[in-house]
């Protein structure tokens, strides 16, 4: 069985390049990790933000956030310099999991910063989606007992509020939570609640990395779920009428396949491009490399 897989894995690069070039965006070679994609449209281009590990151990990774641009989903221009990297003690090990919204005056990014013991969520602003000014005080500051990570920001124009979705991990559980803020500085909090709990077998290890869209008269969330035996990462879906109360779908929308995501699928990011629906996500190979992959999604599942 292992020999058969190795043959498939050896041929997979060739197969993807010839038959399915559009699916694999950034290939992680042995030991490399390209993580936490987030996609957004900017005029005629698609901007894909992602994180890359730059070390070999948990204490020297110094993960940074990078940007790639495309007009056609085939040809990607990857900026050489990171756009977000370590800037204080709370982000001394890693910066990752960006999420961005555009407002009339500026662009807002929330992202995760990690030190050796916990994760926190930070805010940055930009006028051009490339150069970012980081607010060094965390929006949500983690401690040894609690970590905050994998944020997603959404502006609800109907009620003029900012929805900050994020993951909260303690020693006993991981939940996807929602804070509602009055202001774009994410200072004046209106409410806070848990919205996605670990209730399914495939969520027994963790739930995190929400990606939310509005589709017709409902809200749709894609999120990462890890669980089962052995523990496997999959991408799940939940739906809502108001973005606050959610109903989960028990069947994964994306599961591991036989190539670059054979072990895990995680951290989804939804985008609609040329009247088609896509999810960017990170996939883990048998060798432990992580790549950025794209999958087309049928509108009927939304």
Image (cartoon, rainbow, N blue to C red):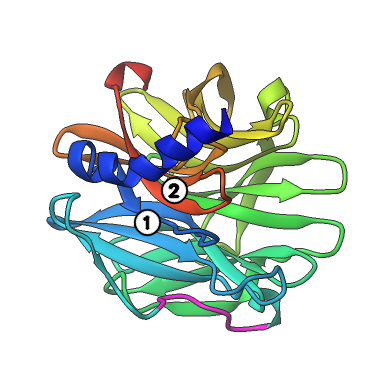
Looking at the rendered structure, the secondary structure element under dot 2 is strand
Relative side of 294 to 98, left or right = left
Residue of label 2: 154
Q: In the picture provided, is 267 more to the left or to the right than 14?
A: right
Secondary structure under the numbered disc 1 in the rendered image: strand
Which labelled disc corresponds to residue 101? 1
Between 87 and 107, the one nearer to me in the picture: 87
Residue 2 horizontal/vertical position (percent): 57, 34
Residue 222 is at least partly visible in this image: no
- Residue 97 percent across, percent down from the top left: 52, 58
Query: Residue at the spot x=50%, y=50% of the render?
Result: 152
Residue stretch in magenta: 82-88
Q: Residue 12: x percent and y percent?
A: 35, 41
**View extreme (front): residue:** 3
Q: Residue at x 81, y 65 (%)?
A: 143
How far across and how far down the image is residue 173, in percent?
A: 81, 40
The single residue placed furthest to the bottom in the displayed view is 88
The quadrant in which residue 50 appears is bottom left
Q: Are marks 1 and 2 in contact (CB under 8 Å)?
A: yes
Q: Nearer the viewer, residue 109 or 249?
A: 249
| Alpha carbon separation for disc pair 1 and 2 | 7 Å
In-image side of 219 versus 17 (left or right): right
- The residue nearer to you, when weighing 241 against 209, is 209
Residue for point 46% across, 69% down: 65
């Amino acid at each position: 069985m292992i020999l058969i897989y190795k043959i498939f894995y050896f041929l997979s690069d060739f197969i993807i390049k010839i038959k399915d070039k559009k699916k694999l965006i950034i290939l992680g070679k042995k030991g490399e990790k390209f993580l936490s994609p987030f996609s957004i449209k900017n005029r005629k281009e698609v901007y894909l933000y992602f994180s890359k590990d730059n070390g070999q151990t948990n204490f020297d990774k110094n993960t940074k956030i990078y940007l790639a641009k495309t007009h056609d989903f085939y040809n990607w221009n990857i900026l050489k310099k990171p756009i977000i990297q370590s800037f204080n003690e709370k982000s001394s090990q890693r910066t990752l999991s960006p999420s961005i919204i555009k407002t009339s005056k500026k662009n807002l990014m929330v992202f995760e910063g990690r030190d050796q013991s916990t994760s926190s969520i930070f805010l940055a602003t930009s006028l051009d989606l490339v150069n970012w000014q980081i607010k060094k005080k965390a929006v949500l500051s983690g401690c040894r007992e609690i970590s905050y990570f994998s944020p997603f920001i959404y502006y609800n124009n109907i009620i003029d509020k900012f929805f900050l979705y994020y993951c909260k991990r303690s020693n006993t559980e991981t939940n996807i939570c929602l804070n509602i803020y009055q202001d774009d500085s994410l200072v004046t909090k209106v409410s806070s609640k848990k919205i996605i709990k670990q209730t399914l077998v495939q969520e027994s290890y963790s739930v995190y990395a929400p990606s939310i869209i509005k589709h017709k008269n409902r809200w749709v969330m894609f999120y990462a779920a890890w669980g089962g035996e052995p523990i496997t990462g999959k991408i799940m879906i939940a739906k809502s009428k108001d973005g606050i109360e959610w109903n989960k779908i028990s069947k994964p929308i994306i599961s591991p396949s036989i190539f670059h995501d054979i072990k895990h699928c995680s951290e989804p990011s939804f985008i609609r491009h040329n009247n088609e629906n896509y999810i960017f996500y990170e996939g883990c190979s048998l060798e432990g490399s992580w790549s950025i992959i794209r999958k087309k999604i049928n509108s009927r599942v939304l």
